[in-house]
Amino acid sequence: MFKDLSDPIYGFVRVEDHELKVIDAILFQRLRYIRQLGVAYLVFPSAQHTRFEHSVGVMELSTRIYNSLGFKDDRLMRVVRLAGLLHDIGHPPFSHTTEVLLGSRGHEDIGYKVIMGQVGDMLKKEGFSWEEVQLIAKLAFKKAQDDSEKLLSDIITGEFGADRMDYLRRDAYFCGTSYGFFDYERLLNHIELVEGKKTVNLSALRALESFILGRYFMYLQVYFHKVVRILNIHLLEMIERFFGSDYFLNTEKLMTLTDGDILSVALKYPQDIHVKRLMGREHFREVFHTNSKEEFERAKEDLLAVYDPQLVRFDSVSKKVLDEEIFVSEKGKIFPLKEVSEIFSSLKDIEIHRIYAERSLKDDIKSYLAKRGYHGKP
């Protein structure tokens, strides 16, 4: 027995009966109310998509990558699909934006605990062994131990795994940008297993480069957008104002919380400055940005010697072009991507440092920084 779910990215996603029971559980349904990109919808209005549809998409794409690698074990494929489906089960409200409130844990730690608990009990009733439940949790959260497990985990969480490929296409689609679109069909059709590694055949090099460039520009133009970043800061300040900084530390409580729980409280206090900054377009404005950490730190020190710290905010973000090595294959041999791609070898890691100011002081502080010789580096 199965059900087809309509999806704007893949057309239809077929869901088996045991998967549907997981999807219908309240623990998973909660993801319908957690936006994929936090408060980015305040900048990109159509970015209203959630962790729910992304998780279903990762399950679908995990299957396609599994098949592309030539695996034939249907039972193992069920495990991989569930790992893809459940990889984001532990996300807090507003996704990655609020992850800093989880203390020493991450959403992966919470998700692992949930799978090994309530979800695991559900899967055992569906005929899965305890060993299979453990494997699902390990594959979903990069806790694989041997090479065979790491290869399966890479299908979901790898550099060009199902998670990244789905969120890139889905985020681009709902943000209304073209950066995240790449020839994913060609990429999928040319993924192959060589020397025990997931590789891309050299004939699909341009599709692979397009994927990497798309992700690179999505970080620059969407994820690290200057207004998105300051709104993230204001969101965290608002949560601390109304809930306290340790509100997300209780795992059981966290698994009942959604974006709406946070916003419903905030909307009761429309005159509160934290609410106005986040939801009333009264956010701080960017007054300076640079790629130089040294220049940023000097400008920060100079500003704080003159201006009240409550009137300025500071933000630093960075992202490597690749977090892990990608291998390209040709005639049974493998090569690091940087050896065969001129485009990749010329890309620099992203590093952006920004200073924001209370909007009425924007021009004043920009003028002050300019007089002190800070002009920023594009």
Image (spheres, helix red, strand yellow):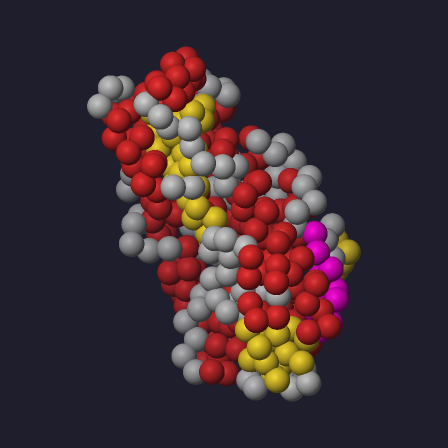
Q: Residue drawn at (35%, 26%), measured in percent from left and top?
A: 373
Residue 186 point in image, percent of width and height:
75, 66
Residue 345 drawn above or below residue 148: above
Q: Give the residues drawn in magenta, as a range.
A: 181-192
Q: Quadrant of residue 290?
A: top left
Residue 238 visible to an observer of this rendering: no
Residue 268 drawn above or below residue 77: above
Is 237 placed left or right of 150 in the picture?
Answer: left
Is 280 placed left or right of 44 in the picture?
Answer: left
**What residue occupies the far left of the structure in this picture?**
305
Q: Residue drawn at (50%, 61%), measured in percent from left and top?
A: 322
Is 128 placed left or right of 242 in the picture?
Answer: right
Of 209 and 276, which appears nearest the observer? Answer: 209
Residue 116 visible to an observer of this rendering: yes
Residue 49 point in image, percent of width and height:
62, 43
Of 311 and 140, which appears nearest the observer? Answer: 311
Residue 71 point in image, percent of width and height:
65, 82
Q: Residue drawn at (59%, 47%), measured in percent from left and top?
A: 217
Question: Is residue 329 rendered magenta in the image?
Answer: no
Q: Quadrant of residue 20?
A: bottom right
Residue 15 drawn above or below residue 377: below
Q: Residue drawn at (77%, 56%), measured in percent from left and top?
A: 11
Residue 21 point in image, percent of width and height:
60, 62
| Tally of numbered tags | 0
| Quadrant including the N terminus | bottom right
Is 39 placed left or right of 329 in the picture?
Answer: left
Residue 246 drawn above or below residue 59: above
